[in-house]
Image (cartoon, rainbow, N blue to C red):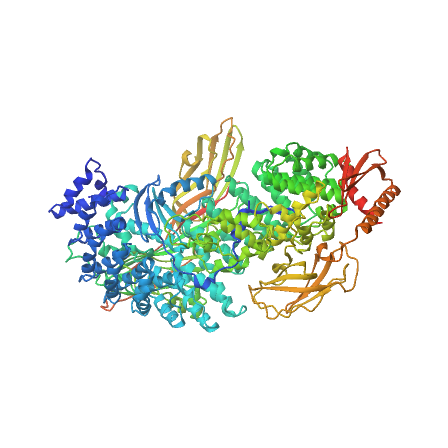
Amino acid sequence: MTDSKYFTTTKKGEIFELKTELNSDKKEKKREAVKKVIASMTVGKDVSALFPDVINCMQTDNVELKKLVYLYLMNYAKSQPDMAIMAVNTFVKDCEDPNPLIRALAVRTMGCIRVEKITEYLCEPLRKCMKDEDPYVRKTAAVCVAKLFDMNPVLVEEQGFVELLNDLLSDANPMVVANAVAALSEINEAKPLIEVNSQMVNKLLTALNECTEWGQVFILDALSGYTPRDEREAQNICERISPRLAHANAAVVLSTVKVLMKLIEMLPADSEFIASLTKKLAPPMVTLLSAEPEIQYVALRNINLIVQKRPDILKQEMKVFFVKYNDPIYVKMEKLDVMIRLAQQSNIAQVLSELKEYATEVDVDFVRKSVRAIGRCAIKVEQSAERCVATLLELIQTKVNYVVQEAVVVIKDIFRKYPNRYESIISTLCENLDTLDEPEARASMIWIIGEYAERIDNADELLESFVDGFHDENTQVQLQLLTSVVKLFLKRPTDTQQLVQRVLSLATQDSDNPDLRDRGYIYWRLLSADPAAAKQVVLAEKPLISEETDLLEPSLLDQLVCHIGSLASVYHKPPSSFVDNTKAPLRQLAPNAAALTTNGSSSGDMDSAPGLIGVPAPAGGVPSQDTLIADLLQLDMNPMGGAAAAATAAPIAAPGGGLDDLLGLGGSLPSYGAAPAAPMVDPLAAWGVAPAAAPAPAGGLNDLFGLGGGIASMGGGIGGVQGYQTPKAVWLEAASHKGLQLEGAVVRKGGAIYMEMSITNKAMQPLSDFAIQFNKNSFGLVPAQPLHIPAPVFPNQTTQVSLRLETNGPVQKMEPLANVQIAMKNNVDVFYFATVVPMLVYFAEDGMMEKREFLELWKEPIHDICTKLQANNVFTVARRSVDGQELLYHSIKYTNKIVVLSELKMEITGAASLTLSLKSRHLTALANLNEMYQQIFDN
Amino acid sequence: MEYMIFDNNIVVFSRTRAIEASPVNYPDCSKRTAVMATSAVFLLDLKGKSIISRNYRGDIDMTIIDRFMPLLMEKEEEGIVTPIISHADGTFVYIKHNNVYMVSACRNNVNVAMVLSFLFKCIEVFMQYFKDVEEESVRDNFVIIYELLDEMMDFGFPQTTESKILQEFITQEGHKLESAPRPPMAVTNAVSWRSEGIKYRKNEVFLDVIESVHLLASANGTVLQSEIVGTVKMRVYLTGMPELRLGLNDKVLFEGSGRGKSKAVELEDVKFHQCVRLSRFDNDRTISFIPPDGAFELMSYRLTTLVKPLIWIETSVERHSHSRVEFMVKAKSQFKRRSTANNVEIIIPVPSDADSPKFKTSVGAVKYAPEQSAFVWSIKSFPGGKEYLLSAHFALPSVSSEDADARPPISVKFEIPYFTTSGIQVRYLKIIEKSGYQALPWVRYITQNGEYQLRMK
């Protein structure tokens, strides 16, 4: 007899028919009818209309039928809460049944009926069942407490169920202990009510040897939350659980590994015990690779964590990670990752020959990853670099399109790591230029051409061919092309002027991508302002790339090791990033993800940006939101985290002064004035990322601000003077200054100059003993009194300080003029930084001048200016006064007969200023001209 | 995109990386380690339609399962299928058995190793109940499956999964309440795998030591990896609650007891059925246990071998593209002369567009298997220390396909009875029961192929 027949009734009036059958007197018919109802329910038909009729069958003496009715109840009680009450009596009665199976069944089912009213009736039977004589009932009741807690936590606390559950930990029966510990762990997760103590640990360790495999997992997982009092206890726990490594169940093995990995941290690093323990860890993990592929996958993801945390454990086991032909692709990919992590000089030959084998397989993704892996080996193991490069070249010869592309991408990285070593292969790469159709490969190739432009004879032609299709390229390629052409120009300025102009105008005028435009403008200004500085910036020596790539950030790794065997360990993400903690059962989209983004990037109030970091992810964390915060954090807290991040925060190669000049040109912009002072932030890098994610909070925003001004000033006007409030800029960044975050601004208040600072402690220890000292500067700015911070600043605390300054200190002309170098000391270290003080603060209150005096003074310089210019072959053509403005027109002719016209506008009323407008048929002729003027005036 | 390094002034961010290195203000991990459990379990047909579902925690919308198949297809298309699929409202963890998907849906940071082990265990239990687990049999047995799902997991926590014990109180017969079975003591006992009161007229134990040899050899003939995974399977027909002790020629044990000279085997890793007292083994390497009734796998062990591959295949392939391809195959048995490999099958891949096969060999039979793009050379009995030859000839079409051919390895199947590669031996099996009966232990040894692959040029 099979059950499938129950699925087949699809006649009309089926519900009616079932109703009659359910109410039939014949037991056999009744049972058949319930089965049909369940079958309908199973295939998703709504049979809730039969609720009262099915409930009527509950009072049956047939166990199988009872189970089916209970099943029905669990499904529909929620939709019919009032009728569900009808069932309570039967439940209560069943909880008293002489057969423990029935008692347990009743208490188990009752807990699954998520109807508020029923929970009240549940308490008494549950209490009885927790003290039942039969362990089967007690173990079921233990779980039921967790169910009740899920629905009504207050009730569970009030009714003392937590204590009862705690008592069950001492139960003689191991299954009861295991379920009690599972229920307690779950309750503790929501609200820490019971602390695991050493006494409890002892009970658990005893039960561990006797309970089922699942019970062992519950106990081990609970143990992983316990922190032993001392070394001895830690060692004792290790000794008692390590035999579990020989369990056939993968979950038991992984949970054991989890606890051991945690406890090892507590033991002295060089002890013999650790050595023997780590020796025990490798074989069980290797054995997991003979399990079902799904379990292998979980094991491999975890092994990936373990080899990062303790590379020693598996360093001898390279071969077991070799890929087999019939491994599922997800296993292959993970094995490859582990292989790269384990690669070292002693085994590199084997690894390489394997990788080469894989690179000729047919699965595209796997092949790609293998090719990348070869590149990573080259970067990781220097001695193998040559062989890796040779292997990559061989692979390029296969002319398999995606292989070539991947190879180009990794070769770029190899060039980065070992500059000036393998450039001989560039010609081979160039042969394959036409086949590259993926953005990353194209960008890489363009990078290579730009980087080695001086050695590639036809670099200009090659780049030009890319420029022709500029607008069809992906942004990544466009950005790279822009940079590479600028590099080319800086290296070979003579014959590439046209090209660079073309690219700059393509990027700035014809593109609507803000990244591209911003970068274009920056290069343009750099090149026109100071080619030498441009050279220093663009051709700066690049920071070394790290050997290991995509290593997890250490604190994340530590956290994930605590979650071995869980989803977090598979995703390599902290649980908070994918677990929705709000209890609402269904999707709850976080509403403010978008709002947060705007807040982060367009906020003019600098203080709000750092504040953002402190904001915990709002409830209902949706990935995108986390990502955003993660980006912020990654930049802020741990700039050296990965290769990409390391590049961002790499110390700026060009001297801050150069940039300063450049951007200060168009008229001093207050907000920008502060930016170069932010020590670690490379403004160009910040621009590069800005649109993708909010960059390093304050510094980055500052830069953006500065950029706006920069562009405005290019147009010839003076931007951003209105509403002048010097915002606080980041002077010291916590990440690179031992946890000290200093933000500040120099302002003029009530006739005196003040330095406003917020000191934030992002270190682990309190900061105290602050002192400050100023270097000689142009205006003799010094503190009027010593810096006094009354109390130590505790971790994560911020203190606001206002320090009065005077201008009677030693004087030395600084470049730029308003630059001040400051040293700040605390109990940890001394930190140095420099800031450009807004000129405004030096404006004396007694600056009012008599009109006559002013006019005299004013005329003098105008005449002066004309003579000065004349002396330098800048000829005054005309002079005119309009609406209180003096306008001077000049002409210049270069020796190559290019003519430049200029207009010098002098504002007499209002704030005195000079505006220079230049005009020429040849744009490049204007480069640096404004500087020339400046120099003439300065003389 | 996961790896990108450019100039210091140009940073290309990889979104995925940024996620991986997420927030730094982690909660103290020591407090957050609960066994967050499975919310629901589903059995689906190949189209992703739910056959049976069981909602354990009431915290998910059961229609969520409708999203499973589209998601899986999407991942398959992107080529990033994994047994764990995350979606906006949680995670699916699934396995596939025949034409049935078994899916666990969860919302929390579940112990995924446990979830997967549980799913496999479920299938194992179902198989004990109704042999083949496939769409039809699942439908046919839906009532019993509901009952089992109810018993095997509570609120997402796995409970009893010993099929022998479950069979004692979950049966297909409708019971009267009075005569309804009680939960066997074993459900909650320390010995949760064996019930009391088992009786046999003849007390017997059968031990099978089965070693699977895994081999991976490169195209140039070097052995990359060679491993033995052995299992000791038992069939136990014993009365009462017997205490068993198994003695092996375990090197660690021998050295401990000063018998270092005798022939012993070094087991790299051993895994035991839950009946074995692990702490005892950890202490003095004694394998002591109260066995379940009937058939079960007592232990498995793993060791890497240094011995010659048992069966070695050399091939030379001559490929005349667009016309024909010729194979010369040499099979060598490299084990002791007095042993014999049975049912040897050597599977040699050929281009998928090959046709008109011609074979020549003195031993065994050769069959072309176009469905797996290979030919199979079967040798019924292959004594040790022998060498056999085969030549094969295929025609190739004059136009060759564009796609690169997958290059599967040569694989070999075989069985060698009365022989273990590792040299492991059962020295004794002591059976002690309080009634003091005499029981007969029987032992068999067999070596067979595991994943036995030799790559081709």
Outermost top residue: B398
Quick check: A334 above or below A904? below
Q: Position of residue A840 (x, y in %)?
A: 71, 54
Residue found at the very far right of the displayed protein: A871
Percent position of residue B333, x then y? 45, 47
The quarter of the picture where residue A96 lies is bottom left
Residue B182 appears in view: no
| Vertical comparison of A475 with B449: above or below | above
| Residue A757 appears in view | yes
Q: Residue A54: horizontal and vertical position, in percent?
A: 19, 48
Quadrant of the rendering where the N terminus of chain A is positioned: top left
- In the rendered image of this protein, does residue A73 appear above or below residue A153? above
> In the figure, is residue A588 to the left or right of B194?
right
- Is residue B47 depicted above or below A186 in this figure? above
Residue at 76% of width from left, 60% of height from top? A777
Q: Give the percent coordinates (x, y) of residue A478.
A: 63, 38
Give the farthest residue toward the left: A25
Q: Nearer the viewer, residue A434 or B375?
A: A434
Count the marks: how many? Answer: 0
**A315 left or right of A894 in image:** left
Side of A342 where B451 appears, left or right: left
The answer to whether A473 appears left or right of A288 in the picture is right
Q: Nearer the viewer, residue A780 or B355?
A: A780
Residue at 48 percent of width and 34 percent of height: B351
Residue drawn at point x = 41 percent, y = 55 percent: A581
